[in-house]
């Protein structure tokens, strides 16, 4: 097991909100990759359900990820997407192999 923190974020847009949510998740990538402690920040969109986005993230440690969660660009995302998400689930994980 490594000390890095793996984050899996499951984001699903409500019907007819796909364009807004997609624009907003894409806008998170550039500033997040520049953050201290960000080792990996990948966004994927499901082939069969285009409303579903999965972020796969890797952070040096939990404290730096927590700092990310308090960043202005992430807070702006939360505010802008209020009422547009069907689901938002975040999993904090450890790599086993």
Image (spheres, rainbow, N blue to C red):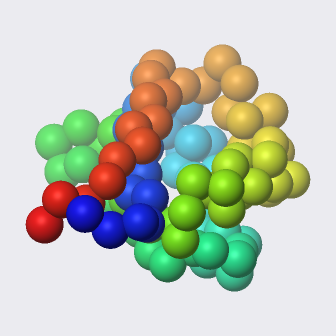
Is residue 55 shown to the viewer in this render?
no
- Where does the image place residue 52, in percent across and percent down from the top left? 34, 39
- Where does the image place residue 85, in percent across and percent down from the top left? 54, 25
Q: Is residue 77 left or right of residue 54?
A: right
- For residue 32, which quarter of the picture? bottom right
Residue furthest out toward the right: 72
Residue plotted at (43% across, 66% down): 4
Q: In this view, does 33 lie to the left or right of 94?
A: right
- Where does the image place residue 18, in percent across and percent down from the top left? 49, 38
Q: How many marks?
A: 0
Q: Is residue 9 left or right of residue 68?
A: left
- Where does the image place residue 22, in percent across and percent down from the top left? 53, 50
Residue plotted at (42% across, 51% down): 7
Q: Quadrant of the C terminus?
A: bottom left
Residue plotted at (80% across, 33% down): 79
Residue plotted at (18% across, 59% down): 96
Vertically, is 73 above or below 51? Answer: below
Q: Is residue 96 left or right of residue 21?
A: left
Q: Which is more toward the observer, 38 or 55?
A: 38
Vertically, is 27 above or below 49? Answer: below
Q: In which quarter of the image is the N terminus?
A: bottom left
Is residue 51 shown to the viewer in this render?
yes
- For residue 38, which quarter of the picture? bottom right
């Amino acid at each position: 097991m490594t000390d890095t923190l793996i984050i899996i974020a499951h984001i699903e847009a409500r019907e007819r909100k796909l364009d807004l949510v997609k624009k907003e998740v894409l806008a998170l990538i550039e500033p997040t990759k520049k953050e201290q402690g960000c080792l990996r920040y990948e966004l994927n969109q499901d082939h069969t359900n285009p409303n579903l986005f999965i972020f796969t993230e890797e952070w040096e440690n939990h404290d730096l990820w927590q700092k990310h969660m308090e960043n202005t660009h992430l807070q702006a995302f939360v505010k802008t997407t209020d009422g547009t998400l069907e689901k938002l689930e975040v999993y904090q994980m450890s790599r086993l192999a």
